[in-house]
Structures are given as C-alpha cells and as structure tokens.
Image (tube, rainbow, N blue to C red):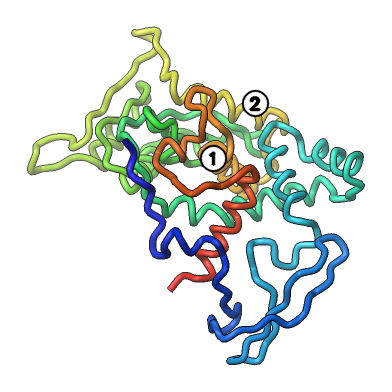
C-alpha cells in the first residue's frame, strides 16, 4: 500500500487554482478587469490588483505564449513518443494549420522540461529502495557522452540520472550515487562490474561506525554470469530509440534539457506497459493529471513556483 506523495509546502486541495494572487505583489486583493484578446489563444481573463494598481493575467505556465496550451503540450508528447521535431512541425501544419517551426518545437521541449523539473524532483515518493544503476553512451557533437541512470525496481521510477561529456570516471559515479542517496532510503544498489563503482560506493556509503557499506552493493558481472541489468536496460532501450532519431545531440546543454524532459515523460506521462499506469502513480503520486498530463504538470509546477513562501 503506497503512501501519498508529499507535495509540501502547499496543500493538495489548493490545486484547483481558484485562489487568485497578484503576479507582482502576491496580494489577494484582486478583481476581474475585462479580457486580453489573443490571436491564437482566444480571450484571456485580466485581473486588477487594488494593492499595487497593476493589471495582469494568471500565469499557469503559458504566459506570453502565442500558441494554445493544448497544441504545445501535444507537441511535447509527440516529440517524446519518437517523432522528430520536423515531423511534429509538419503534423501541426498539415492537420491544424499551424506554422510552428521545428526549432519552436525544440524550444518548447527545452523550456517546459526545465519548468517542470524542480517540482518533480522535490516530490517525496514511496520508493522501494531496490535500485538498479547502469550507464550507456549517447553521443553529443559526434563525441561520446555517458548517460548514467538508476531505476527503482518495484515502481520503475527513475530515481536519478546524469548526462556527462566525460568518459566513465569516479567523480561522475559519485554524482549519480549522491542523487540516489538524496532521493530515497536505499536498500541495495545493483551495478555492472565497472571498476569505478566500488570506489564511489565506499566514498558515498561507507560508515566507520559500522565498519562497512551502509547500502548493499550487488555487482552483476555480465562476462561471468551472462546476465544483464534488465530493468534499467529496458529504459535505456527506450532512450536510445528516441535519441537515435536525432543521430546525436548537437549541444550539451540542450541534451541535458531534452533528457530531463524524457525522464519526466517516462515517470509522469507515459503509462508503463507492465504497471498499466505511470511509475509516479505506482510510487504514490496521487494528483490526477487527467488526459493532458503535460499541461497539468506545467500548471502545477508553475503554481508552486509562484506561490512559494
């Protein structure tokens, strides 16, 4: 039985967005004041703040966007379902008479992955602590980049990941282990026989009082056992299917933003074939995101950012 994910500091019941607050001074002393008419998004309700005497529209994550919310979020979903940015652009043009360029699609992907990431990473979820960690090569600028990733065995939730422009090394192994340590109470971590893992595990999880590791380290040597780290390998297969369409990442910063969005999509948007629901839902995330999960995630992330104490 999973406990409900914590979404502090705000109460879940406030997620109906009925509470209107001034975007500038945070006052609730506001009244409706006509509409802002836009070419593509229709009428937007305007508000007037009696405290700072400024007019504003509510920011639900799409402030000043020219295109409607459903079109932007549909593009995000299609992009992570393995359509190239050019194919998404062509689809919008052919069926919705929209002229968003492929570069606009990529800009939306990068923008909204960074907008949602702080919220999803702040969640306290009910994870099993049975962690499977591995790394794979994803090229950036035709050079080898290493994508480290760790998955929770029971919920299939990606608990930590890291994209590095360096070959495998102890420092990066420690960085990915730290994200796991900060995210959950870990029972064990299973890795392959990469030589850097034992050193990184000792530096991150060794206790002088206990005289050993505080977390079990299970090493799966494929060359000896013939067995693979199947749970994380399936995730890597999905990532590679997406990135292979691009041949390679063109920019390291952009690569990180795109991978951020992919992990969010994998954890919160895409139903896992085995689970029949998203890994986040399996891990206790109880907020109903509805059918347009990207849109709701963006709205919630924006709400918490704007209403943070």
146 sits left or right of 154 in the view:
right
Secondary structure category for the residue under label 1: helix
Dividing the picture into quadrants, the one containing residue 142 is: top right
Relative image position of residue 20 (x, y in whole percent): 58, 74
Q: Say if residue 262 shows up in the picture.
A: yes
Numbered badge on residue 263: 1
**Mark closer to the chain start, 1 or 2:** 2
Relative image position of residue 175 (x, y in whole percent): 38, 44
Q: Is residue 90 above or below residue 22?
A: above
- Residue at the spot 65% in from the left edge and 83% down from the top edge: 31
Image quadrant containing the N terminus:
top left
Image quadrant containing the C terminus:
bottom left
Task: Please state which of residues 269 and 134 is positioned toward the viewer in this rendering.
Answer: 269
Q: Say if residue 174 shows up in the picture.
A: no
181 sits left or right of 227 in the view:
left
Secondary structure category for the residue under label 2: helix
Q: Is residue 39 above or below residue 82?
A: below
Q: Is residue 277 above or below residue 297?
A: above
- Residue at the spot 57% in from the left edge and 68% down from the top edge: 18
Q: Gap between marks 1 and 2, in whole Å?
A: 14 Å
Query: Which residue is label 2 attached to?
Result: 241
- Residue at the spot 88% in from the left edge and 49% down from the top edge: 98
Task: Please state which of residues 44 and 193 is positioned toward the viewer in this rendering.
Answer: 44
Relative image position of residue 60 (x, y in whole percent): 63, 64
Q: Residues within 10 Å of mark 1 (few under 14, many from 20)?
A: many
10 sits left or right of 68 in the view:
left
180 sits left or right of 301 in the view:
left
């Amino acid at each position: 039985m999973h406990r409900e994910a914590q979404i502090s500091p705000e109460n879940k019941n406030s997620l109906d967005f009925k509470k209107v607050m001034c975007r500038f001074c945070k006052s609730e002393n506001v009244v409706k004041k006509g509409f802002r008419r836009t070419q593509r998004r229709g009428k937007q309700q305007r508000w007037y703040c009696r405290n700072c005497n400024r007019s504003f529209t509510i920011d639900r994550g799409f402030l000043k966007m020219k295109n409607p919310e459903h079109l932007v979020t549909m593009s995000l979903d299609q992009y992570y379902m393995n359509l190239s940015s050019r194919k998404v652009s062509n689809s919008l043009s052919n069926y919705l008479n929209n002229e968003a360029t492929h570069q606009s699609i990529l800009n939306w992907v990068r923008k909204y992955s960074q907008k949602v990431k702080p919220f999803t990473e702040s969640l306290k979820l009910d994870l099993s602590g049975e962690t499977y960690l591995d790394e794979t090569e994803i090229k950036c600028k035709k050079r080898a980049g290493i994508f480290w990733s760790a998955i929770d065995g029971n919920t299939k939730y990606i608990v930590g990941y890291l994209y590095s422009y360096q070959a495998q090394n102890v420092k990066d192994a420690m960085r990915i282990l730290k994200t796991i340590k900060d995210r959950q109470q870990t029972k064990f971590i299973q890795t392959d026989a990469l030589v850097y893992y034992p050193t990184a595990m000792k530096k991150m999880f060794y206790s002088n009082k206990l005289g050993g590791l505080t977390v079990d380290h299970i090493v799966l040597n494929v060359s000896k056992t013939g067995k693979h780290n199947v749970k994380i390998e399936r995730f890597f297969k999905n990532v590679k299917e997406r990135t292979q369409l691009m041949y390679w990442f063109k920019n390291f910063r952009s690569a990180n933003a795109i991978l951020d969005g992919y992990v969010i999509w994998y954890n919160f948007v895409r139903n896992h074939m085995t689970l029949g629901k998203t890994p986040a839902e399996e891990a206790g995330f109880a907020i109903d995101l509805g059918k347009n999960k990207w849109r709701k995630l963006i709205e919630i992330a924006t709400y918490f950012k704007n209403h943070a104490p």
